[in-house]
Structures are given as structure tokens and as C-alpha cells.
Amino acid sequence: MSVEFIKDTHQYIVDGIITPSVSEILKETIFFDKYSDVPEAVLQKAAAFGTAIHHAIEHNDDTLLDDTQKRVFDDYKRLITEHDITPIKHE
């Protein structure tokens, strides 16, 4: 299986097929308009938080994280250690 991520358009291509992200699937099947009343600034702040954590996990580097983000990163590391999870690939 080949997985490609196109950063500019935030698209995933799996074996040559454009594939929705987990976020897209959740939004379309579970959350619908759950966040429609949340101010855009709050959504942007949450997105930046998630992007920082994602980058730290992908590169195993927490040097650019604030204290709250470092706690989340440490929780992730604890989770994979406690449950003997070996990530195969980070995109």
C-alpha cells in the first residue's frame, strides 16, 4: 500500500485514489455541523494546537511545544509505550 499526503491541499492519496482524512469522515458522518456555532478564531487556535502536536509526533521532537502541548505529546508517548504500540508510519 502506498500513502501520499499532499500538504498544499491537505489530501491523502492511497494507492492512487484520493481518500478522505479521518477529520473529513468524522465531520461528514458524526459531527455534521457540531462546530458551526464555534467562533472561527477558536477553531483556528485548536487547529494550530493539533498541527503542533502532529508535527512533534511525526518528528519525535517536542522542543517547539508549549507546556500544554508537551503534556499531550508525553501522553501520546506514554500510551504507545504502555500498550506496546509501534507506529508503522507517520505522514
Image (cartoon, grey):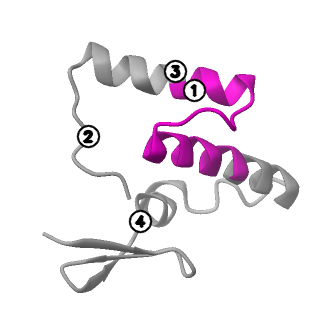
Q: Nearer the viewer, mark 4 or mark 2?
A: 2
Place of residue 27 in the rendered image (x, y in percent of width and height, measured from the top left): 51, 61
Task: Looking at the image, tell me whether mark 4 or mark 3 is earlier in sequence order.
Answer: 4
Farthest residue, direction left: 1
Q: Residues within 10 Å of mark 3 (few under 14, many from 20)?
A: few
Q: Looking at the picture, which amino acid does disc 3 mark?
A: Asp
> Which of 20 and 10 lies nearest the eye of the viewer?
10
Residue 8 within the magenta-colored segment of the rendering: no
Secondary structure beneath disc 2?
Answer: loop
Look at the numbered discs 1 and 3 and tell me whether their residues touch, using CB distance below 8 Å.
Answer: yes
> Which quarter of the image is occupied by the N terminus?
bottom left
Please determine whether, in this image, residue 6 is positioned above or below residue 40: below
Q: Looking at the picture, which amino acid does disc 2 mark?
A: Pro
The CA span between labels 4 and 3 is 24 Å
Q: Looking at the picture, which amino acid does disc 1 mark?
A: Val
Question: Dot 1 corresponds to which residue?
Answer: 72
The CA span between labels 1 and 2 is 17 Å
Q: Which residues are magenta?
A: 48-73
Task: Looking at the image, tell me whether mark 3 or mark 2 is earlier in sequence order.
Answer: 3
The CA span between labels 1 and 4 is 21 Å
Question: Dot 2 corresponds to which residue?
Answer: 87
Look at the numbered discs 4 and 2 and tell me whether their residues touch, using CB distance below 8 Å.
Answer: no
Task: Looking at the image, tell me whether mark 4 or mark 2 is earlier in sequence order.
Answer: 4
